[in-house]
Amino acid sequence: MDGPSPPAESPGAAQRRRRVLRIDLLALAGFGVVFAAVRLNRTAAFDVAIALRIQGRRRRTLGRVMTAISWPGFPPQSRIIPPALIAGLWRRRLRLEAAFQAAAWATALFSTGLKGVTQRARPLAPQVRVAVAQLGGSSFPSGHVLTYVGVYGFAAHLANSLIRPDAIRRTIVGGLVGLVAAIGPSRIYQGHHWPTDVLASYFLGLSYLVGLATLYDRLKRRQLER
C-alpha cells in the first residue's frame, strides 16, 4: 500500500519559495554581469569615479571606523573568528547550525578561486588613495566582502532564528547586518578594492547566502517535526 501523501504546500509557502528563488537568480545574474564587464575592461571609469567619491569624505574618525570594520577580515583574526563561531554552536549542541555556519565560511574559498581566474590589479596611487596593508593577489573579487556576507550574514540569520528576547535579537542581528553592509564601503574607502570588486562580491555572496539559508530553514523544520 502507498504511504500517506506529503502535505500540500500552502500558497503562502509557494509564494515565498518563488520569491527567494527570484532573489537568488537575480543576485547570481548581477554577479555575472559585473564579472563580464570587469573581464572586458569596461568598468575603469566607473570604478575610479565611485572610488574617488567615497574617498572624498576624509575624516580621521571615519578612517578609524573603516579600519575597524575591515579588521576582522585580515589574518590572523579572519582564521580565528569563523571557527570560533562554529565551535561555539557545536558546543551548544547546535550541530545543524554549526555545519551550516561552516558551509557559510566556504565563501572564502570562492574568493580564492575567482582571484586565480581574474588576476585583476589592485587600485594604486595616484588613481585613488590607498591605505597601507599587507595585500596580495587579485583585486577581484573582494575576499572581505564575500567572507563577511557568508560568515556574518548567516550568523545574522541564525541569530534571528534562535535568539528569543527581542531586544537582544534585534541588537545582534542589526550589528551583524550593519557589519556586512559597511564592509564594502570600507574596502573602497581604504583603496584596497575597486567598487566593482565589492559589487560583484555582494551579488555572489547574497546568492549563496540565500540558497544556504533556505536549505537550513527547510532542514531545521524537518528536525523540529521529528
Image: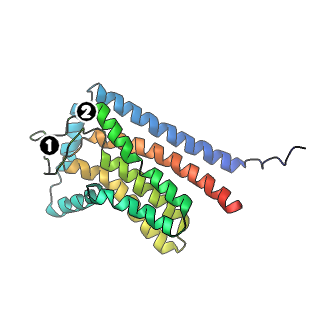
The residue closer to the viewer here, 81 or 148, is 81
Report the amino acid beneath label 1.
Answer: Val
Report the amino acid beneath label 2.
Answer: Gln
Pointer 1 residue: 128
**Disc 2 packing (10 Å; few <14; some 14–19; many ≥20):** some
> Residue 189, percent across and down?
21, 50
Considering the numbered disc 1 on the image, is that residue within a helix, a strand or a loop? loop
Q: Outermost residue, right direction?
A: 1
Q: Are marks 1 and 2 in contact (CB under 8 Å)?
A: no
Cα–Cα gap, marks 1 and 2: 19 Å
Considering the numbered disc 2 on the image, is that residue within a helix, a strand or a loop? loop
> Residue 65, percent across and down?
23, 62
The residue closer to the viewer here, 208 or 165, is 208
> Residue 33, percent across and down?
38, 31
Quadrant in which the N terminus is drawn? top right
For image coordinates 41% across by 41% down, the residue present is 204
When asked about the image quadrant of residue 139, the answer is top left
Residue 126 vs 222, above or below: the answer is: above
Quadrant in which the C terminus is drawn? bottom right
**Relative to residue 40, is residue 88 drawn left or right?**
right
**Relative to residue 174, is residue 119 drawn left or right?**
left
For image coordinates 56% across by 45% down, the residue present is 20
Residue 105 vs 169, above or below: the answer is: above
**Relative to residue 86, is residue 58 drawn left or right?**
left
Pointer 2 residue: 119
Q: Outermost residue, left direction?
A: 126
